[in-house]
Image (cartoon, rainbow, N blue to C red):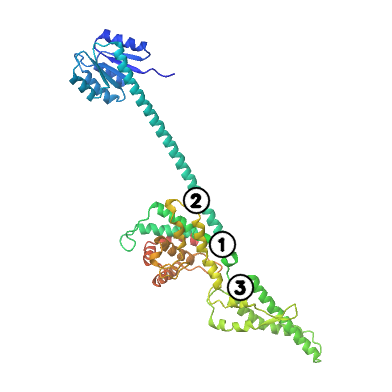
């Protein structure tokens, strides 16, 4: 049920005031009366009145205009209509200027009061309805804002989970690099924060916002995602030859020993030499001594370190070795691809395999480019794409030069190289100490590969301390 509107009648004439109160109550209003401005103000302080009728001139105290001004301070939503038997144009204008809704002259008919009241209350109701609508609209906006913020949080948690799942997928392909992506992210963001604290120098004017730091963190976490497109046997290749290929070569050398020993036994028998039960084993032992030397050569050539010249020169011995194929024809112990692999001068990868490894950067960019990034993350694919570029144009995959490489990518390059050096032993390399790693970074900086200002800040701010505990762990 709707509460009746409250109306206050303020007049020093008791009979007149009582008459109006009774008339308004008969119309369905919650009416009250007050004999003075002071008494009216006491009631206004205690409850809200939609409409106040007040006499303009009341003896012995405040006037209707004084009450009007006081009511506006206590309850500005109340409408006021002034009544007086001394109406003048000046008084009416003064009342309206001070905020009165209307002005009626005594004596008046009840119909005149009702008409003025209806106009005022219609306006009052419109304002209150607008206020209620505005309030509800604000509540709806707040509710919707909360829903949007909650949805944003959920999307961010979903994306964070996607990024972490992607990192897990990357590292599951190459468990020896576990933790690399997150360490690079910590180092890169730490370096960017150090740049923010730097005054002067090439990076003195650069300040990364929180959103840009978040973008850089995600780019760092996902910088190696393209490795999912590289064959696993290439990605984790520790030696020049895969284990099964090395085993095949060693088995063929053993078979060759047996074949030569047996051939020498048959020749001795055909020449009429007497039977000697231990001769075969002696011949085999002689052959195995030679084969162990060859096996040692194969194993030394198979290591991913720099191939010594004296070892490389002896590779010709291996190329001419053969054994008896089961088809009855001679076959080389080392296939041409085996010889090519063992002749790799440094590392474990052939040129084609190195190119395949390097292609992970392009795979990363193509993958990240497919994601509809928000405005605050729109540069993420490009940042990750350039982390293997070098200032002198000798990086990959595009051979960009310094001015073409995003600053964020230059920071990530320092962090990426550093972590690759100090990380725990990998199948194809051993960990390098922190001091030695910093020396290598300095050498690469001097060679025009890494950004000198980024390295200086990395070194002076001791950004590398951020992951020391994780490396040692």
Report the residue at 36% width, 12% height from top. Answer: 27
Q: Distance between the residues labelled 2 and 3?
A: 39 Å
Q: Using the image as rendered, state which of residue 262 and residue 56 is in the foreground.
A: 56
For the N terminus, which image quadrant?
top left
Percent position of residue 370, x then y: 51, 55
Q: Using the image as rendered, state which of residue 372 and residue 332 is in the foreground.
A: 372
User: Which residue bears the numbered disc 1?
Assistant: 229
Report the residue at 53% width, 55% height from top. Answer: 166
Please tell me whether mark 1 or mark 2 is closer to you in this view. Answer: 1
Q: In this view, does 176 lie to the left or right of 248?
A: left
Report the residue at 41% width, 31% height from top. Answer: 136
Relative to 394, say whether 191 is above or below. above
Residue 50 is tagged as: none
Residue 160 is tagged as: 2
Q: Are marks 2 and 3 in contact (CB under 8 Å)?
A: no
Q: In this view, does 123 lie to the left or right of 155?
A: left
Q: Using the image as rendered, state which of residue 156 and residue 64 is in the foreground.
A: 64
Relative to 128, say whether 423 is above or below. below
Within 10 Å of disc 2 (Cα), the crowding (few <14, some 14-19, many 20+) is: few
User: Which residue bears the numbered disc 3?
Assistant: 241
Percent position of residue 104, x then y: 25, 16
Within 10 Å of disc 1 (Cα), the crowding (few <14, some 14-19, many 20+) is: some
Q: Distance between the residues labelled 3 and 1?
A: 21 Å
Numbered label tally: 3
Could you say whether the residue bearing mark 1 is in a helix, strand or loop?
helix
Q: How far apart are marks 1 and 2 (CA)?
A: 22 Å
Please report whichever mark, 2 or 3, sits nearer to the chain's N-terminal start. 2
């Amino acid at each position: 049920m709707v509460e009746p509107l409250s109306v206050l009648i303020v007049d020093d004439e008791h009979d007149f005031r009582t008459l109006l109160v009774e008339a308004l109550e008969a119309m369905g209003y919650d009416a009250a009366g007050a004999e003075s401005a002071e008494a009216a103000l006491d009631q206004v302080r205690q409850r809200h009145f939609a409409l106040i009728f007040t006499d303009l001139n009341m003896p012995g105290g405040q006037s209707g205009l004084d009450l009007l001004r006081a009511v506006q301070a206590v309850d500005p939503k109340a409408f006021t209509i002034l009544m007086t038997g001394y109406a003048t144009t000046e008084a009416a204008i003064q009342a309206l200027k001070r905020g009165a809704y209307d002005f009626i002259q005594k004596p008046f008919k009840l119909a005149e009061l009702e008409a003025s009241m209806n106009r005022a209350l219609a306006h009052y109701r419109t304002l209150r309805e607008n206020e209620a609508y505005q309030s509800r609209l604000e509540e709806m906006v707040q509710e919707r804002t909360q829903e949007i913020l909650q949805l944003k949080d959920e999307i961010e948690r979903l994306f964070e989970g996607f990024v972490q799942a992607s990192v897990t997928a990357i590292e599951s392909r190459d468990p020896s690099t576990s933790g690399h992506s997150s360490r690079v992210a910590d180092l890169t963001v730490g370096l960017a924060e150090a740049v923010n604290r730097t005054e002067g120098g090439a990076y003195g004017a650069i300040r990364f916002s929180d959103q840009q730091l978040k973008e850089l963190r995600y780019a760092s976490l996902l910088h190696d995602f393209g490795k999912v497109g590289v064959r696993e046997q290439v990605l984790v290749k520790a030696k020049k030859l895969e284990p099964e290929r090395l085993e095949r070569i060693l088995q063929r050398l053993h078979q060759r020993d047996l074949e030569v020993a047996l051939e020498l036994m048959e020749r001795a028998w055909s020449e009429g030499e007497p039977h000697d039960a231990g001769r075969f084993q002696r011949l085999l032992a002689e052959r195995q001594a030679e084969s162990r030397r060859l096996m040692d050569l194969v194993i030394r050539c198979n290591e991913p370190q720099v191939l010594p010249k004296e070892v490389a020169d002896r590779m010709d011995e291996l190329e001419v070795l053969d054994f008896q194929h089961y088809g009855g024809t001679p076959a080389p112990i080392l296939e041409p691809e085996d010889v090519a692999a063992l002749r790799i001068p440094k590392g474990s990868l052939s040129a084609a395999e190195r190119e395949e490894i390097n292609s992970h950067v392009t795979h990363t960019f193509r993958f990240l480019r497919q994601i509809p990034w928000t405005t605050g993350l729109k540069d993420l694919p490009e940042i990750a794409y350039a982390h293997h570029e070098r200032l002198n144009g000798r990086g990959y995959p595009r051979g960009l030069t310094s001015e073409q490489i995003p600053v964020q990518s230059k920071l990530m390059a320092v962090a990426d190289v550093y972590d690759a050096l100090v990380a725990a032993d990998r199948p194809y390399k051993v960990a390098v100490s922190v001091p030695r790693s910093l020396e290598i970074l300095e050498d690469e900086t001097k060679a025009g590969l890494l950004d000198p200002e980024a390295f200086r800040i990395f070194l002076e701010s001791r950004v590398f301390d951020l992951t020391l505990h994780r490396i040692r762990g």
